[in-house]
Structure formats: C-alpha cells, structure tokens
Amino acid sequence: MFVEKRLYFPILLFIYLLCCSSRFAISQPLQDYNFTLSNSTAGLAGLSSFWINRPSLIVNSTTDGFYGSTTPILKRGNAGPRFLFGFYCRYNVTECLLGVLLYHNKYNNENSMIDKPHLVWSANRNHPVKFNATLQLGHDGNLVLTDSDGTLVWSTDTIGKSVSGLNLTEIGNLVLFDKRKRAIWQSFDHPTDSLLPGQNLISGRKLIASVSATNHSQGLLGLTVRNGSWAAYTDTNPPQYYYTSYYANSYYYSFNGQTFTVLHYPTNSTAQFMKIGPDGHIKVYQWSAVDWNEVSDILSPYVDNCAYPMVCGSYSICTNNGQCTCPSQENFFRPFSERKPDLGCSQLTSINCNSSQYHSFVELKNTTYFVFQFNHDFSSTKIFWLEGEKLEDCKRACLSNCSCKAAAFEYNWDGDRRGNCLLLNEVFSLTDSEEGRGETVFLKVQNSSKPQTQSLIIPGGKKSRPFKVIIGSTLEVFFGIILSIATCFVIFRKRTHESRKGADILDLAPILPGILTRFSYNELKIITDDFSRKLGEGGFGCVYEGTLRNGTKIAVKNLDGVGQVKESFLTEVKAVGGIHHINLVKLIGFCAEKSHRLLIYEYMVNGSLDRWITHENRENGLTWSTRQRIISDIAKGLAYLHEDCSHKIIHLDIKPQNILLDQYFNAKISDFGLSKLIEKDKSKVVTRMRGTRGYLAPEWLSSVITEKVDVYAFGIVLLEILCGRKNLDWSQPDEEDVHLLSVFRRKAEQEQLMDMVDKDEDMQLHREAVTEMMSLAAWCLQGDFSKRPSMSLVVKALEGLVTVETNLDYDFTHVPEVGAGNQEREVIISSKFPSILSGPRPVFIANSTANLYALTPILLSGTTGPRYHICGFYCNYSATECVLEIWETWCSLTSLIAQFGNLLIILRIVCSPGRIWFQDRTS
C-alpha cells in the first residue's frame, strides 16, 4: 500500500504543477498580436482564471481625458482597428474601469504604450475600482469583478451556464462562450455609450451618455429603440424625447423597425465607432492619420442646436444666437455660474408640496420646449400630454399636480383657442420661439409670502393704469436717486482703479489663454493647507503640494522676491500657458493677486530627475530601459519647444532639477522662468547671461545664443543619467574627478569610457549600449555650437534613424575662434583690454563654490603658472552689480578663458574702494 502511494505521488504532483502552470499562463497579459481563437481566450473548462489590476501599459494622450495606464487582459487585432480588454486607470490608479478599448496604432512593446484609445464599453462605469482589484472567471462560469477591499462590484450573472472560456472578437465584442463556441454572454448586449460597426441595438436596450468627457458615470441622455422607431431621449421617469426616426437612410447605420445596426463606412476605412456624447449629440468618429476625427453628427440635419435637452442646463433659455440666459424674474431664478451660463439656473426657493397654496407661475411668452416636436409619438407613455385643451385648463392641471414643475402650451393652427399642453416633472433647456403660435411656458415657483388669490401669474406684462400713475408721480425722485448712485459709482471706480494699480495687479488678458484657471490666493492657501507641504525649492521660490476639491493633486509654485519675479512669472505663462505636449509639465492655472505670483502645475509623483540620478540606495536605481525612455522624453520635449511651437522657445535652464517624473517615470520638462521666446525666422538672440552653473554652453561668453545652448545642457544631463552622478560633484576624493566633463574627456582619450558607466547592476549589464550613447552626449557637447545636432536630430538618433557624428572634439569647453573677440582674450602679461575701459562688459565666467559670476578682466599677470593674478570687474551673473577686485587662480589661462571651471577666489583686494552700480545691461 505504501509503495502504491509513492507511485501515485509523482502523478499527482505532475497534475498539480500542470494546473498551476496553466493558470499562470492564462493569467498573464497577452503580448502577441497574431491571435488565433485559442490564444485570445482565457478560462478553460474546470480552471479558474484570475487577473489583478496592476497597470503595466501606459496610455498616451487619450481623447476623453481619462488617461493613465492599463492592465491588459486580452488584445485583438493585427491591422486596422485594435481592441484591448482590461483595467483602464487614471494616472494615480485610484479610479479604474474594466472595459474594452479601441485604438489604431500598433502596440509598441518596447515603449509599453498605446496611443489615444477610446473606451467603447465598460462593466463598472458607475463604480470605479482601485489598484489590486481582481477579475475572476470561476469554475461556476461567472465572471466577477471585485474591488481591492473585497467589495463585489460587477458580474456577468452566468452561474451554471456551462461557460467554457472568454474571448475578445475581431469586432471588439467580449464573449463568454460554451464548449460549442456559442455565446453565453456578450458585451454587445450591454452597451454603455458607444456602438461599434456590426453592433446591434434592439428594442429594450439603450445607450446612456457619460456625465462628462472625464466622468464616465451614467448621465441623463440616451438612445433606444421603441415602438418601431429609434429615439434620443432623457433618461428620466417619464422620458423626454428630443428626436425620433423611422428611417434608415444613412451611410453609418441601418434600421428595420426593430434593430438599429451600426455600419462601417466606407468599408475600407480605419477604426470607427458611434457615440452619444454628454451633450446629446450622436456622432461617428473615425481614425485619421494621428487622431480621432468626427465624420458625422447623425442628428445635425434634424435637431437644432437649441433643441438638445442640456444645451443650456435646467430652467435656462437658449436664444436664437445660441446664448443661454435665466428667466428675467430674479426673485425666483439665478444662474449656477455667472461665468458658465450653459450650466443652467436654479430656483431660489424649492417647490413645497405641503404649501401648494403658495404656488404660482412665471410666464415665459414666445418660449417653447423641445419635447413638443416628438413626444406625441409616445403618448402611450407616462408623459403628461394633453391635446385640445384651453390655456387655463393647462395651468390648472399643473397646479393640481404636485410633481408638475412646468406647463408648456402651444395653440392649434385652426384658431379655436385650444392647443396642446405638456406637463413636465423635470425641466431642462427652454427655447426662444419665432413660430408665432403663442408658445408659452409656465414655470411653477414657490412664493414665500402669501397665497396667490387674485392671479396665478407673476406680474410681468402690461401694467395697470393706477400703477402707471404711481410711477409717473415718483419719476422725479427716481432720477434724483439714479444721479446720486452714478456719482458714487464714478468715485468708487476711480478709487478701485488706483487701488488695483497700487496693488500691482497684472493685466494678463492679452497673454493668457482662456484654458488657464485663475485662482485666488485664499483658495490656494486652502488647497495647500496654508503652504505646509513643501515639495522643493528653486531660484525663484518654493513649490508646494496641494489637492483640488475633486481629489486631484497639484504642485503650486510660489514666486517670491522682488527683482525678477514679475518677469519670471510672465515668461513662464507665455512659454507654457498655450502649449501642450506629453513631455512638458502642464500649466493648470495661476494667481496674480496684489504682490502674489503663483503658478499651478500638474503633480508629478516621482519628483525631479536629480533624486534618481544620485541614488544612494541602489535598489531604487533606474533601469537601463527606464533611463532610455527618460532621455527620449527630454529630447522630444526640447524638439517640440525648438521646432513645433508658434514661437521658438529656448529653455535656457535644462538640468535634472527641472526634469520631473510621473508615476511611470515618464519625463516632463518644467520651470520655464528663464526661457526665451524668439520668432521662428530668427536663428540667434542676444540676451543676458542666465542659467545654472555647470550647464552653460561656451557661447554664453558672447551673450549671443541659439537653441543649441539647450542641446549643450541636454548633453550634460544625458551624461549624468548614464554615469549616475552630478556634473559638479565636490564629494569626489580626487580633485580631477570633480568635473564630469573633465573625466569624460580623459576617459575618452584613454578609451576607458566603460569606467564611467553607472555601477547599477542593470546598467553594467548594458554597459556597451551605454557607452555607445555617450557618443551622442559628446555630439551634443561640441564647443562649436554649429557642430551640435538639433534636438529633432537627437530624437532620430535615439530612434536609430540616423547615426551619430564620429568626428568629435572632446574638448567640450573650447571656444571656437570668431575673429578679434577671441584674439583679445589671448592677451596676457599685464596687457590692457581696450574694450573694457568704457565700463564692465563681462567676457569670462567665474565659477565659485557658491555662485556663478561674470568676469571683466582689465589686467592679467603670469604666463606659465601655477598662479595667475587678474584685476578686473567681478559681477553677478546679470552684470547688475560689479566690484573692482583682484583675484588669484591656479588654472591655466586657456582654462580660465574657456573652461568656466576652477576659478577659486583667494584674494579679495579692492583696487578702487567702493562698489560700482550701473543700469542693467539686458543685451
């Protein structure tokens, strides 16, 4: 018996391992696009498939604002439309939808990214899940979605229905099938807000629009098939219809009275889908070369813009020119938002059914309601539709029914003083009418004082004779009051203008795009917990973490100081306020209130790049693939600034501290306070020296610079990423290793570049590829800016489309000869600099241990070293403060002129007492 058990044990162990391996294989995200039926299914009979929401695929620039990442479960498609079934999450993975994505680009396995997908179906649109949520196809055949806390969110309710597996079809239908491949459950039978070509909408099913482009929860507007027609309506009880049709005369759909089917037109076109939007429009979208384009608005020939239920919001009137206004009776209605009138109006006093004696109407003449045109087609429903009624009977019917909030009336054409009456228990957008049929809407309101016994209508028409007499008798007093008010108003405006001028409130209207949000300083104090959570500190102020009301985290940059704060604020707003790129940090809003200058940016979870370059804990080091992506992101962002914007934008302060990383280590360029905007047709610009020591290109000596100064700084950052150290590292034990460029030059001459590769284990595994990329850094660091590549060429080099220049000069700080200017710098041994005598004009750069300074030499002594003495003007980097001094240095004269390094101040002997002040030389 014991021997038999020993014989059975290997067999049982083999079966167990087989089951485990099968389950593991089934549960992995599918990466191959060449699917067959077998490898695009999951959950074989008798096995339980299990997936955990742990995003591994980045989503780039989605069209609906719901961007971030995905956890792929199934993929389908090889050419043309492609589908992905899985978890679709916001960037912070706090809200995830289980659904089907449609996209057109081929999935880039190397970059782990898909571009501009569209969510065409979701299982849990009203109940998003979080990180570590699970999806399980159980032995019982039920597909179950459970949140990370164990809450049951959704299931297919297919227990005991002989489910054999899960499949994502070629047309985007998610199917649970049995052993005979017959559909037991399919997503096409449970649409959300979109339909795919080949998908049917039959009687009893409906599409429901989302609340907004960024909120996928179920909204109010829908599309359904009913009573032999297809109809667009509000998903209320009872429904209100704004379009019905019995016809099938469209390229994009067919209808036979029972089934509404979406067609693919033209048949050879790319990815396509139909969607009902939050505004009620039913549109067809098709993939073009780079994005989704609207190719048809199905209802546009039949439905006027003012005839959509939510075009102006509840109780608001849509006028003939498309404007939205509240009813003029201010005692009863006010707009939700003065700035956004299309959000609708609210009643100041809610209707109370227990006080019906205080109910009356606000009469809106020449006003109609969208339902009039279509709701008689559905008179069998619960819509309160009365035909052949008198106007007074219509009003009484509404007053006697507490659920009635408004009565809409229009007279018949035959002139018998009767017409159609519509009683509404929900009031959406109203419409100005010009048809002349006496269209009138009566809005029920609650009076707070006394019952309306004399009239059911709030006075708003012609006044009685006694009332006119009263107005006439008080007209003189009225004009006197108006004159007094006008005088006070003029005085108040004058004082307000002076107060605003004194408070230095910037006029930002000419430069600020309309998409930026203006925040008050008090709002930002609340958002940032009184600026208590500091993220970092820069040259112009501190950055604080904040949280908006919707839970979105933001970064608030508080610009402080006096001198250049206003200039930095305006520069940054001009530079990034109107541009959008995935590799540029997004500017959300601003605050310009009195002396306060703040900028509000998107929050970057992983902070700045410098934290990850000089990692002390090797376990937190960046992998080679991540560093490649970061380098590519920086290059693409700079290429966009230099070549793809309406103005050429030179950043002028590229360094690791200004490269921010999101949750998935995508890099974005930030801090445009020192940037320079120039016209596209200009190749050079004259500007004062600006930037950070260690990242300045040699041509800064002349103050005439191009976008190639950013290329030079990019080369240094690239080298820092590859070597895992700072450019200037004073902690190095050997003084020769303090400057990374000096080490780079020495190792290149010794052919020992591998010694510079970051000692991270993964970097060492790829050290040959790393050293190859160092040649790209050397190309960007050429002393002659004309020999550096453009950033678009750098991007192509990173993508392998062009080869890196091989004839490279590793003396990166060498200043090329440009004529007499350079000859003057060669003069030594107490020679005078003739151009200096008229005043301080910096031609050297001094790099002290504390700051970056500009040098205007007058006399130099010493020819061979090791020490040199210099007499001249010692200025701050902007040359606004200069002192006449003598210094002593050990560097060679060539290094002094060209290398910007090792100029340490030993002596501070003032040749002429006092400090020289002069006007800022911005040139």
Image (cartoon, grey):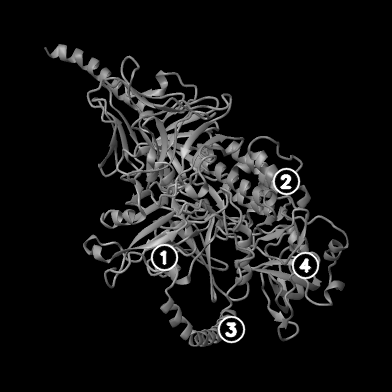
> Cα distance, mark 2 to mark 4?
26 Å
> Cα distance, mark 1 to mark 2?
60 Å
Which of 211 and 348 lies nearest the eye of the viewer? 348
Q: Position of residue 480 (x, y in %)?
A: 52, 88
Tell us which disc is closer to us: 3 or 1. Answer: 1
Residue of label 2: 789
Q: Position of residue 75 (x, y in %)?
A: 45, 28
Q: Which mark is residue 843?
A: 4
Q: Position of residue 145 (x, y in %)?
A: 30, 36
Residue of label 1: 334
Which quadrant would the N terminus be assigned to in this image?
Answer: top left
Tell us which disc is closer to us: 3 or 2. Answer: 3
**Which comes sooner in the sequence, label 1 or label 2?**
1
**Which comes sooner in the sequence, label 2 or label 4?**
2
**Which comes sooner in the sequence, label 3 or label 1?**
1
> Cα distance, mark 3 to mark 2?
56 Å
Is any part of residue 865 visible from this angle?
yes
> Cα distance, mark 4 to mark 1?
65 Å
Residue of label 3: 494
Badge 3, how many Cα within 10 Å: few under 14, some, many 20+?
few
Q: Are marks 3 and 1 in contact (CB under 8 Å)?
A: no
Q: Are marks 4 and 1 in contact (CB under 8 Å)?
A: no
x 48%, y 33%: residue: 102
The amino acid beneath tag 3 is Lys
Element on which disc 1 rests: strand
Task: Indicate whether 480 appears above or below 775.
Answer: below
Element on which disc 4 rests: loop
Is any part of residue 742 visible from this angle?
no
